[in-house]
Every structure is written in structure tokens, then in C-alpha cells.
Amino acid sequence: CRQEMASKSADDTKTTSKLLGLKQDDYEVLVMAASAIGLSILYNLLQESMFTSDAKKYTGMITMMTSLVYAVLAFFEFKHELVSHAKTKAAHGGDEGTTVKTGVLENMKGTAFDYARLGTLTAAGMYFTNWSLQYLNYTLRVLFKASKILPTVLIAVMFYKKKFSVAEYVNILVLVASIVLFSYGDAVGKGKTDNASFDIFGIALITVGVIADALTSNFEGEHLFKTRKASHSEVMMAASLFGSLYMLVLMFMTGKAMDSYQYLIENPDLAVKVVVSCSAGYFSITFILKIIQRVGAVTAEIVKSVRRVVSIVLSFIIYSKPFLSWHLIGSLFFVLFIYNTFQAKVAKQKAKDAAKAAKQIQEAVDLEVFGNGNKKNGGGH
């Protein structure tokens, strides 16, 4: 008994830090959260620096380079997952006489046709969103990307027959109100500083981009993740590869390929910004997924909300854009949207935990009842 207590005390010493009384797992989650927020801020600042320069005229090239970077990063992640899986299976003594294949193509769950379609959607979402930044402020882009939930819900209801609560619909309207107020603030503040821009055509472009993103999310979730059982890295790799090819073809078809190439040669820092910003964005998403795996969606939602708010605040401070009363009211609506989203995540997690606990209790009761019945039957013989 003393040995068990000593062992338990040793384990606690290993996993618990004296600082703030937090466990090692808690620190790991904090590090992942801080990394996700920091990398996301870096991504947004570098992206905004690109789209407030002459580089924004070369939307196709930036989209192609972005997709290509994502494809390369996802390839290495997918390959790492395959090798890790093979090592784990070998360590646990897999089937004798068989070897686990670690080739990328032979382990892909989705088909070329799947990714050709998905690549069209991802490329369209990215291209139209980037194009819109020739006419809109970057902060409005952040808000519009959050509004992807609106077409996502509509598509899920119409095509996949999913149901949502009244509170969820109301929260979507809160987000829409936030975007409308921000848009009006940008329209009123247009021209007051060099970075203050607004054009209704930009709203049309980014709306198309958001709808494409929503179609992407539904296709990934319902077809590739649920049906095909494909991994996130596989989907990102293949879809981004197709997307980069589509953008390259588009550049040649529109006659902008040579101009884009010449601009890149004269401005090599653009390539550096694209690689660094996309890498930061990719790993930020990776940390978010790790947080979801470790502690659930509620904590991940907090992290995502913090990075959105901080990115918007820094954008106004660093790029000297007018912050009007309309922006303030829109910000309050956006914070309300974030709060409602967080509360919804908490409620779902509680319901999930309660269902799990009820199932465990029922299993325990069944075991007790049927176990006693078997004993009685055995005693009768």
C-alpha cells in the first residue's frame, strides 16, 4: 500500500508543476493555444501587408502560391502520419508476414474526382476572397470569413437535412448585423486614410468566396471525412494541389502569367511573405485541431475567438484605419456572436458528457442485473 502511495506521489510530481498548481497537460494546452493565437496573428498581419500593397493586383499568383505552400505542408504532414502509423503497428506486433505501406498515393481515401471537385471550391473561395481585398478592408475579410457559418448552415439544412436550434439561427443574425455595421462603417470612413477602402463590388466578390468556402466545408465533412474517412492532411494536400493547378491555368488563360512572374522577380519579398504567412496559418490550424483532440471543442472555440478579436484590433492599430461608432457597435455585436457561440459549445459538451455518463450508468445496471441472473441460473444447475 505504501509503495502504491509512493508511486502515485511520484506520478503527481512528474505531471504537476508548482507554478500555479497546473498539471503538465494544462501547460501543453496553454502552449498550443498561445502558439495558435500567435501564428494566426502573424498570418493575418502578413496577409494584410500583401493586400495593402501593389501585390493585391496579382490575385491569381498569390492564390496559386498559397495553395502550393498548403499542398507541400500537408504532404509532409500526411507522410509523417503514415510513417508514424506504420511504426505504431509494427511496435504492437501487427499481422505477421505483412508490411504496412507508407506510400502517399496508395493510402489516399479520396478519389482524384473527389479532389478535382474540392479543388475547384477551395480555389474559388480563396481567389474571390483575395480579389475582394482590392476593394475592401482586411478587417471586413476576417468578419466575412466568420460568416461562413451562414451559408454552411443553409446548405446543411437544404441538402443534408440537418436541424439547428432557434438560438443558432438568432446567433447567425447577430453575426450578420455585425458585418452590416462594419461594412457601413467602412463605407462612411472610405477615403479618410490611405488604408480605408470600400466598394460594393468587393462585397459581391467576398460573398461568392464565402459561399464557395461553405460548399467546401460541407463537401469535406459529409463526403470526405464521414464517407471516405480521409484525414485532414490528405484532404488539404490534394485539394490544394488541384487548386494551385487551376490558378496556374487561369493565369495563362487571362494572360497574366508573365506579368505576375515579372512582378515576383522584382519583388522577391512577396514569395517570403506568402511562404511564412501560409506556414503560420497552417500550423495555427494544426494547433487548433490538437487542442480539440486534447481537451475538446469548447477550449478550441475560445482560442479561435481570441485570435479573431486580436487580429481585428491589431489591424486597426497597425494600419491606421478610421474606427467609427459604426465599427464600435459592429464590434459589440461580433463579441456577442462569439459569446453565444462559446455558450452553445459549452451546452453541447455538457449534453454529450451527460449522455456518456447516462450510458455508463445504464451499462453498469445491465451488468449488475444480468450478472446476478447468470449467477442464479448457474446456482440452479
Image (cartoon, rainbow, N blue to C red):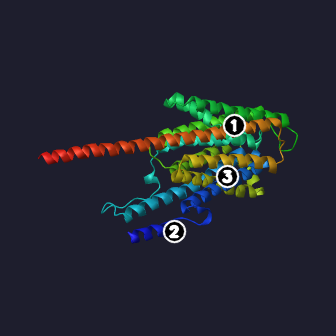
Residue identifier under label 3:
40
Closest to the observer, 308 or 375: 375
Residue identifier under label 2:
14
Say the numbered circle drawn on residue 206. Answer: 1
Residue 33 place in picture, x, y as percent: 62, 55
Residue 248 place in picture, x, y as percent: 64, 47
Residue drawn at x 71%, y 45% as measured from the top left:
59
Q: Marks 3 and 1, how far apart in space? A: 20 Å
Q: Mark 1 or 2, which is nearer the eye? A: 2
What quarter of the picture does the N terminus occupy? bottom left
Q: In this view, does 51 lie above or below 92?
A: above
Asked if residue 47 lies left or right of residue 25, the reply is right
Asked if residue 317 lies left or right of residue 28, the reply is right
Q: Marks 2 and 3, how far apart in space? A: 32 Å
Displayed quadrant of residue 125: top right
Residue 220 place in picture, x, y as percent: 52, 41
Q: Please rate how many residues cluster around mark 1, counting C-alpha atoms within 10 Å: few if below 14, some from 14 to 19, many from 20.
A: many
Q: Please rate how many residues cluster around mark 2, counting C-alpha atoms within 10 Å: few if below 14, some from 14 to 19, many from 20.
A: few
Asked if residue 181 lies left or right of residue 104, the reply is right
Residue type highlighted by circle 3:
Ser
Q: Please rate how many residues cluster around mark 3, counting C-alpha atoms within 10 Å: few if below 14, some from 14 to 19, many from 20.
A: many
Q: In this view, does 356 lie above or below 28?
A: above
